[in-house]
Amino acid sequence: MEFVRLEVEDGVGTIRLDRPKMNAISFQVQAELRAVAEEAAAREDVKAVVIYGGERLFAAGNDVKEMADLSFADMVAAGDSVQAATTAIARIPKPVVAAVTGYALGGGCELALAADLRIAADDATLGQPELLLGLIPGAGGTQRLARLVGPSRAKDLIFTGRFVPAAEALAIGLVDRVVPAADVYSEAVAWAKQFTTAASYALRAAKEAIDQGLEVDLATGLEIEKVRFAAVFGTEDARTGMASFVESGPGQAVFKGR
């Protein structure tokens, strides 16, 4: 990979964007993100994932220069590629946290939205400024942002294209935690490390039940939960966890991820 790599240490996989100067998300970066996300999903030594753009910024957006001369037909053909990277991140069946430094704009914001949790620097700036280019978000922004902050706030942010400082992003739920800029990555890794010894299949079942349940009515969501709940009873970790609870109380189980 030229611009995206997966770095694994102590059970935490970091998906690292490194495309100078602004981590612009080109079609090549999208393809590399998709490939690395699939690798992180498949590797047994990766228990949780951090998405990180470096100390200076997360990602300033899609590569506008690359898209400027594309026609309607060109973008119809490329549309699946634009969404595939964020979809691949969102579908990693493990906890995923975005460590947001500097700017997370346009496609960069959409990449952060695909994570389960967002930890931002106190000087970070997020936003969906595509309308200012005569465009709309195309990598999941109109859907994930509305689900995260509600339709009215999403419309405000997308219609105006305005930049959102970290404090406001925290207040409206666009990010989940704000920390000093120097601590963003370490805080994200610390969050991810909680899950390196967790019951992996239960985590996966919980994530799938939540994500899939958000797409359907409550009754169908409850059916999804019921199926996932029954399924984890087939794991060794469930037997270990319940036996440990009976014998020693909560929080003492040692899971093996199977």
Image (spheres, rainbow, N blue to C red):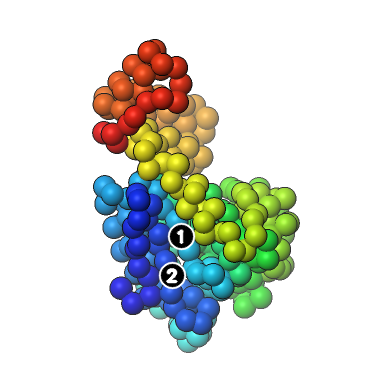
**Residue under the image location 35 percent in, 62 percent down:** 7
**Where 84 falls versus 195 (above or below)?**
below
Query: Which residue is depicted at the point 34% across and 49% down?
Result: 11
Quadrant (top left/top right/bottom left/bottom right) for the C terminus:
top left
> How far apart in space, not on screen, are marks 1 and 2 (Cα)?
8 Å
Q: Which residue is mark 1?
A: 51
Q: Is residue 148 above or below residue 84?
A: above
Q: Is residue 169 left or right of residue 214?
A: right
Q: Which label number is shown at residue 17?
A: 2
Examine the rendering and report whether any part of residue 162 can be seen. yes
> Within 10 angstroms of label 1, few (less than 14), some, or many (20 or more) residues?
many
Q: Is residue 75 visible to us here? A: no
**Which percent across, then down, holds residue 194?**
45, 41
Q: Residue at x 62, y 63 (%)?
A: 181
Q: Please report whichever mark, 1 or 2, sits nearer to the chain's N-terminal start.
A: 2
Q: Quadrant of the N terminus?
A: bottom left
* Whether residue 58 is situated above or below residue 143 in the rendered picture: below
Which of the two residues, 14 or 103, is positioned nearer the viewer here? 14
Residue 73 spot, x, y in % from top left: 41, 77
Q: Is residue 40 left or right of residue 50?
A: left
Amino acid type, label 2: Leu
The residue at 66%/75% (across/down) is 132
Q: Position of residue 157 (x, y in %)?
A: 69, 61
**Amino acid at circle 1:** Ile
